[in-house]
Amino acid sequence: MSDIQYRARLEQAISRLMPLSGSGDRTRIAVPILYPSGSSASVEIMINAGKCFVSDLALGQMEAEMHGADGYYDAAARKAASRYHVGYDGLSVFATWASLDNIESAILSVSNASVFAATSAIYKSVEDKERKKNDAVYEKVARLFGATHVARHTEIAGENASWEAHNVVTFTRGKFGIFEFVSANQNSIASKFMMFSDLSKLEDKYILTSVVSSLAGMGNKAAMLQDVSEVLQLDAEDTYFLRRAA
C-alpha cells in the first residue's frame, strides 16, 4: 500500500468515526467519546469571521437527566469546565470563539468536559442513593441482629484485595454477614460482584447478601449477583434476613 493509499484509508476511517452533519455556518460532529449510556458525544460548531463557537448542545445535561442525576450536574459541569478550560452557562458546555487553528483542541475539550461532567454527576447520584439505601439496610439488620453486632461500614480483607463493606454483622462461630445494597446501575453491580467474588474465596468466612430494591427491577442482572451471594429485596420479611445467620 502506497503512502497516498494509506493516508486516504486513515482519512476514511476518521470520517466514519467522526461524521459531520449540518449546513450553512453550523456543523455538528459526532466525537468517539462515550457517555455512560454508551451514546457518543457530539458538538456543534458555529463559525463567524473565522472564529468558532463550540457547544455540546446540552447533551451532557440531558445524559445526567436521563439517569436521574440532573440535580448533581450543575456542580459537576462547573468543575469539568474549570478542569478543561471551557465555559459553562448552566445548560451547555462550550468553548468561546476558538480560532480555526485550534479547533481540534476546542472540540476535544468541550466533548471531554461534557462526558466528564455527566459521568461525575451520575456517579455522585448513584453513590448518594446507595448511601441512603445502605442506611435503610443498616436500620433493618441492626433491629434484627442488635446494633452492637452490626458495623455500618468497615474495611474487609479479601483473597486479593481490601474492600469497604457495609452492614457487617458479627455472627457466632467466627463468621460474619455482609449485607450490601446494590442498585440496578451497572457500576454498582460490577463493583459488588467483584467484591463478593473475592470474599467468597475465604472458605465461607463471610455470609454474603446483596440487598436490592426490587428483584424484578434488576432483571437478568440479579443472576450475576446470585452467583456470588444471596439476593434479597430490602422489603423482604424479617425471616429471610434472619436465615442468613443460620
Image (cartoon, rainbow, N blue to C red):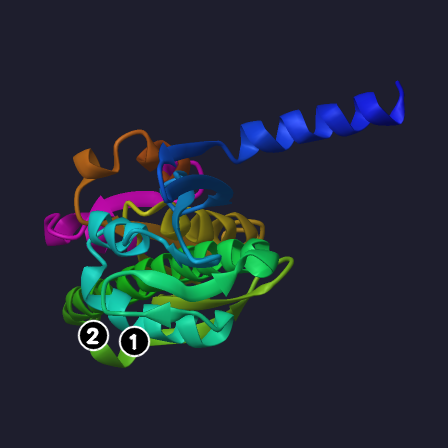
Can residue 2 be seen in the rendering of this structure?
Answer: yes
Q: At numbered mark 2, what does the secondary structure look like: helix, strand or loop?
A: loop
In the image, is residue 195 part of the stretch drawn in magenta? no
Note whether 9 is above or below 45 in the view shown: above
Q: Residue at x 41, y 39 (%)?
A: 38
Circle on res. 149 = 1
How far from the left and from the top, in percent, is residue 165?
Answer: 41, 66
Q: Is residue 226 left or right of residue 9?
A: left
Residue on which the image places disc 2: 146
Q: Residue at x 39, y 40 (%)?
A: 28
Image quadrant where one finds the N terminus: top right
How far from the left and from the top, in percent, is residue 168?
Answer: 36, 68
Mark 2 vs 1: CB contact within 8 A: yes
Q: Residue at x 26, y 52 (%)?
A: 211
For the residue pair 27 and 81, the one nearer the viewer reads as 27
Q: At numbered mark 1, what does the secondary structure look like: helix, strand or loop?
A: helix
* Amino acid bearing label 1: His
How far from the left and from the top, in percent, is residue 204?
Answer: 50, 52
Per the model, the C-alpha gap separating discs 2 and 1 is 6 Å
User: Which range of residues does the magenta coloring cover?
Assistant: 226-246
